[in-house]
């Protein structure tokens, strides 16, 4: 589903990603872990072309992301074409980014109606179904200000799912939440994984990674230091840098 080949990203003279090559199979859950500033979130943003890669190539479902190839050269897509491509990739951020003037239901309905032209009645029925799926059927008429952080994040997940994405990206989805609210969001993500959704998750939740992920990638300094089955990497890391990081977080 996702293929990264030698992906590098620089901001001016600061190289944030250094030749990242990774593969995520359809239906797989990959967790990216590592210290702050290691490039995890930047890599995630490159996958849906919120950031343009400096060198290398990224493909989702066999299609180049953000570029088209002609005569052996890559040409960046127009913002409109990139946005059209982005419809197939759902993303959930640390901050919930809900529209404050819209109810939970309206937040979930908005993109299918506006972007896909889905009839309102159909979008509403689907939105109600998704709110029920994330455990918020009884909160559909609430505005974000009247929802807890965990509830807002679950609305954000429902909103991303409303576009029927092939791939879901999660950028530290629980890091802004109070500890007692983390579990309700992780439970929704576990359900998604069990349903076969392909997911890439930047997280500090090692229990979630151990239980749900198919692969664990440890990044530091813009490179992939270590990758493997989560239980193996967490129980028996091979690299000193991985050992040092895990000794602080486990």
Image (spheres, helix red, strand yellow):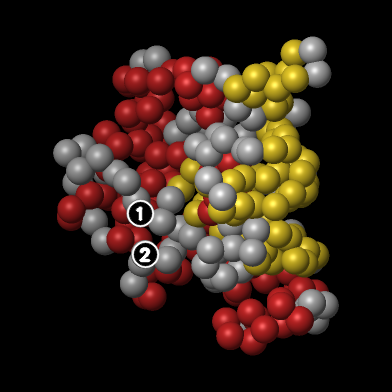
In this image, 77 relative to 196: left or right?
left
Q: Residue at position x 36%, y 64% from top?
A: 176
Badge count: 2
The image shows residue 169, relative to residue 112, as above or below, that is: below
Q: Residue at position x 73%, y 60% from top?
A: 224
Identify the mark at residue 95; answer none if there is no mark.
1
Identify the mark at residue 130; answer none if there is no mark.
none
Whichever of labels 2 and 1 marks the residue nearer the N terminus, that label is: 1
- Mark 2 lies on a secondary structure that is loop
Identify the mark at residue 176; answer none if there is no mark.
2
Q: Nearest the camera: 124 or 116?
A: 116
| Disc 2 to disc 1, C-alpha distance | 7 Å
For residue 119, what is the image quadrant? top left
Q: Are marks 2 and 1 in contact (CB under 8 Å)?
A: yes
In this image, 145 relative to 231: left or right?
left
Outermost residue toward the front? 13
Q: Position of residue 139 (x, y in %)?
A: 26, 49
In this image, 186 relative to 59: left or right?
left
- Mark 1 lies on a secondary structure that is loop
Can residue 194 be seen in the rendering of this structure?
A: no
The 10 Å Cα crowd at callout 2, few under 14, some 14 to 19, many 20 or more, is: some
Can residue 50 be seen in the rendering of this structure?
A: yes
Q: Residue at position x 62%, y 45% from top?
A: 9
Q: Residue at position x 26%, y 61% from top?
A: 148
Q: Position of residue 197 (x, y in %)?
A: 63, 44
The image shows residue 109, relative to residue 229, as above or below, that is: above
Q: Position of residue 136 (x, y in %)?
A: 34, 51
């Amino acid at each position: 589903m996702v293929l990264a080949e030698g992906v590098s990203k620089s901001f001016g003279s600061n190289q944030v990603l250094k030749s990242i090559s990774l593969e995520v199979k359809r239906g797989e859950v990959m967790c990216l872990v590592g210290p702050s500033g290691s490039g995890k979130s930047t890599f995630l943003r490159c996958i849906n072309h919120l950031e343009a890669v400096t060198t290398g190539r990224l493909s989702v479902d066999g299609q180049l992301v953000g570029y088209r190839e002609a005569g052996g050269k890559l040409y960046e897509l127009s913002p409109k074409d990139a946005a059209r491509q982005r419809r197939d990739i759902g993303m959930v951020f640390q901050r919930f980014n809900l529209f404050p003037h819209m109810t939970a239901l309206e937040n979930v309905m908005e993109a299918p109606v506006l972007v896909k032209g889905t009839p309102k009645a159909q979008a509403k029925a689907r939105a109600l179904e998704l709110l029920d799926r994330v455990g918020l059927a009884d909160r559909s008429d609430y505005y974000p200000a009247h929802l807890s952080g965990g509830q807002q994040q679950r609305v954000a997940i429902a909103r991303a799912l409303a576009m029927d994405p092939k791939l879901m990206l999660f950028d530290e989805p629980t890091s802004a939440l109070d500890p007692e609210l983390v579990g309700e969001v992780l439970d929704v993500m576990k359900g998604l994984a069990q349903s076969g959704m392909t997911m890439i998750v930047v997280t500090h939740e090692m229990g979630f990674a151990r239980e749900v992920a198919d692969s664990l990638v440890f990044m530091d300094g813009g490179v992939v230091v270590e990758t493997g089955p989560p239980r193996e990497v967490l129980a028996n890391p091979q690299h000193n840098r991985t050992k040092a990081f895990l000794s602080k977080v486990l």
